[in-house]
Image (cartoon, rainbow, N blue to C red):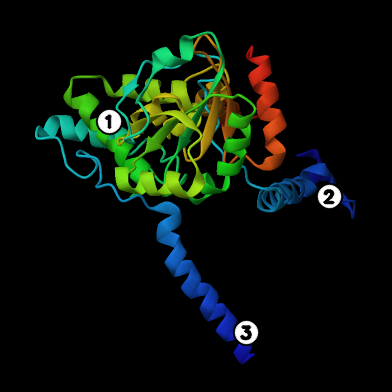
Amino acid sequence: MSEAASGKSGPKKPGVAFWLPLILFAGFVALVIYGLVRTANTEVVSAFINKPLPVFDLPPASDDRPGLATAVFKQGKPRLLNVFASWCVPCAVEAPQLAALTAQGVEIDGVAIRDRKQDLAQFLAQNGNPFARIGRDDLSQVQLAIGSSGVPETFVIDGKGIIRYQHIGDIRPEDVPMILRKLAEAGA
Amino acid sequence: MMRLWLALAALFAAAQISAPLAAQDLLPPAPYAYKQIADPALEAKAQTLMLTLRCLKCQSQSIADSDAPMAGDMRHQVRVRIAAGEDPEAIRAWLIERYGDYVSYTPQLKPITWPLFAAPLAILALAAVLLRGRFRRGKVPT
C-alpha cells in the first residue's frame, strides 16, 4: 500500500510487491522444467516389505514342478520368489542370472502370471528351468497380494516367510552379488 | 534420405511384430474384468471404487479405464469382493497396504496429507478476516 502511495509522489524503484508475481512465475517455470528434465521413476515399490507373505496356495503351472504355497517359505531357509511369465521378454533375459543363483545353491520358486501351460513349457525349454516350484496365478491374485506391479519381480523371503526385499525388473548380471547379499542378510 | 526412411520402416515393422510378444498374455480376461455384477447397486459401488484406483501398469489411468490385463484382474478382484459384501473402502485400504497411497486417486487423511484438507479452510478463514477489516473500514466514515 505504502509503495503505491510513494510511487505517486515521484519516480521511485518498484518494491518487492511489484516483482513478487514475476518471481513466483519464475519459480513455477523452474519447477516445471525440473519436472520435465528429471528422470521419471515409474516403479511402484511394494509396501509389503518386512511383512509376512500372504497366505496362498497356487496350483502347479507346469507338469514337472509342484504348485506353490506359503508354507514352503517357512522352512527356515531364505528363498527367492520370482514373479514371471512366458510372455514377458525381460523374464527370458534374466534366465541366465536365475540359473547362476541356483548354481550357488539358492532356491527359487516361481509364480507364473496369466500363463498357458504350453507357452510356459516352451519358455522353460528355451530358457532353462531354475524353479523348484511354479504356482499358477491366472488372476494375478498372488501378485496383487504381495504388492507386485509387473513382471519380472523377485522377492527375497526369509526363513520365517517374511518378505525382506523386492527387486523390480530383470536381474542383471551385476545384480547377482547384491541378491546373494540380500539373501545372506535374510539369514541364509 | 531414402535409406533412412527404409530403416525407419523396417524398425516400425519390427516393433509391430515384437510388441504383442512383449506385453500380451494369451489368457482370456478374468471373468469379471469386462462383466458387470448382476446387481446394479453393487456394480455402481464397484464402478465408483474402480474409477479411483490407479492402474499400476499404465499409471495415468484408473483400472476402470485401462485395458491392461493387470487392470482387468484388479477389476475382477474388486467386483468379486464387492459382490461378496466387502466394503469398497476396505478394498481400497487393502490395496494401499500393498502399493502405498499411489494406488488410490482419492487422497487419504493422514498426518502427511492433512494440510491438503486444512488449506482451503485456512484460506477461507484468512479471506474472512481480510474482508471483515475491509467492511469495517467502509462503515466508519470520518
Amino acid, disc 1 = Val
Q: How crowded is mark 2: few (under 14 residues within 10 Å), some or many (20 or more)?
A: some
Tell me which residue sits at (50%, 20%) in the image.
A48
Q: Do labels 2 and 1 share a chain?
A: no
Residue B95 in picture, x, y percent from top left: 40, 25
Tell me which residue sits at (68%, 34%) in the image.
A176
**Residue A7, labelled with which disc?**
2
Using the rendered view, name the quadrant where residue A102 is placed.
top right
Q: Nearer the viewer, mark 2 or mark 3?
A: 3
Question: Can you identify the residue that label 1 sits on?
Answer: B78
Residue B25 in picture, x, y percent from top left: 35, 49
Q: Nearer the viewer, residue A180 or A106?
A: A106
Question: Going by the image, does B136 lie left or right of A180?
Answer: left
Does any portion of residue B45 appear in the rendered image?
A: yes
Does any portion of residue A116 appear in the rendered image?
A: no
Q: Distance between the residues labelled 2 and 3?
A: 63 Å
Question: Can you identify the residue that label 3 sits on?
Answer: B4
Using the rendered view, name the quadrant where residue A175 is placed.
top right
Q: What is the secondary structure assignment of the residue under circle 1? A: helix
Q: Which of A46 and A11 is in front in this view?
A: A46
Q: Distance between the residues labelled 1 and 3?
A: 49 Å
Q: Which of B92 and A174 is in front in this view?
A: A174
